[in-house]
Image (cartoon, grey):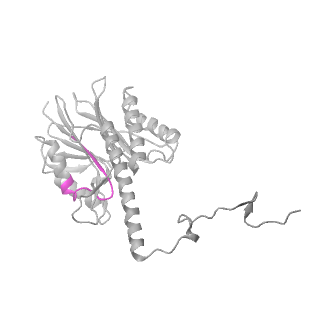
Amino acid sequence: MSPTMVGVVGGEPLPLHPADDRIPSMRAPLTAAEMVQDLRERLDRQEEWLAEERGVSAALREAILPEPGANMDLPTARIAVRYAPAVQPRGDAAAPPCATLGGDWYEAATLPDGRVLLAVGDVSGHGMAAIAQMAQLRHALVGLAMTGRPPNRLLAWLNALVLNRLDDTIATVIVGLLDPATGLLTWAQAGHLAPIMVRDGRARQLRAPRGLVLGASPDPPFTVSKVRLRPGDLLLMFTDGLVERRDRDIDEGLELIMRAAEKIGHHDLDASLGFLIDAAGGLSPEDDTCLLAVGVLGR
């Protein structure tokens, strides 16, 4: 028997390779300058990836929701909507702020029976996952509303959708059906902030009917509330990104919005929504925002 030959396979010597820098144990220690350069390159790649995701998210939102500021003029009411992303300042003061898109959404559509569907919702999270879930809820609501069923029933169906098709999703929403002929608004909510109504120059938050966030329970107790809007009234639906900030109580944000709402009119609702965002302290750095305003005209 021939003796064992170390380092030889089939009589051929094993090839020798230079140290592979992908293997930590064989990589020479980096100098301080090399470590800084490596960190910069990693940050640049991360920024490129985030910019690409933000671009895709923005394109997806634009394909799903109407343009910001899209209005609807009815014989007896004017409706304006606005979406605003969360905006965070960058470390470099000269760089433009970074916009973060999330799952806030709105809907305003005329139904076959002449009533108008009004809705504002908020899916938890940010990025493409939240936007995709938002799209499913929004499109499902529009389809379900064609049945003519009341808002509490629509919310029950949306809750079943979240529990059975949208894993690990929590969402809030407010749904209203407005009869333009009579001004009657029938509405329900799922863990969402109640609307603000301005009448005769005084703003107040409507009392919310019973409701629970979508996805929290298989059989939540949704009920409806009704209010008859009069000529001159202003109704505001919004997501919590408008009023909630880390450095203040949400009630303080609501108070700011109510005082600002008392100063706006119906002549330019789209500009008034921008005024409300400014009154709340500008765009939120943590959360996106949706607003929907209904200005009731004379009948």
Is residue 261 shown left or right of residue 38?
left
**Count the marks: how many?**
0
Give the image quarter of residue 245.
Answer: bottom left
Q: Residue furthest top?
A: 112
Is residue 8 shown left or right of residue 238?
right
Please indicate, yes or no, whether residue 190 appears anywhere in the rendered image.
no
Q: Residue furthest bottom?
A: 32
Q: Residue at x 57, y 66 (%)?
A: 18
Foreground residue among 150 and 207: 150
Foreground residue among 251 and 29: 29
Q: Quadrant of the C terminus?
A: top left
Q: Is residue 31 above or below residue 76?
A: below
Q: Residue at x 48, y 41 (%)?
A: 162
Residue 190 at x, y percent in the picture: 40, 45
Give the image quarter of residue 45.
Answer: bottom left
Residue 257 at x, y percent in the picture: 21, 54
Q: Residue furthest right?
A: 1
Whether the magenta-drawn stretch holds residue 230 is answered as no
Residue 282 at x, y percent in the picture: 22, 57
Range drawn in magenta: 277-293
Please indicate, yes or no, whether residue 83 appears anywhere in the rendered image.
yes
Q: Residue at x 24, y 39 (%)?
A: 67
Residue 174 at x, y percent in the picture: 35, 42
Whether the magenta-drawn stretch holds residue 288 is answered as yes
Q: Residue at x 33, y 37 (%)?
A: 64
Is residue 162 shown left or right of residue 289?
right
Give the image quarter of residue 296.
Answer: top left
Q: Quadrant of the N terminus?
A: bottom right
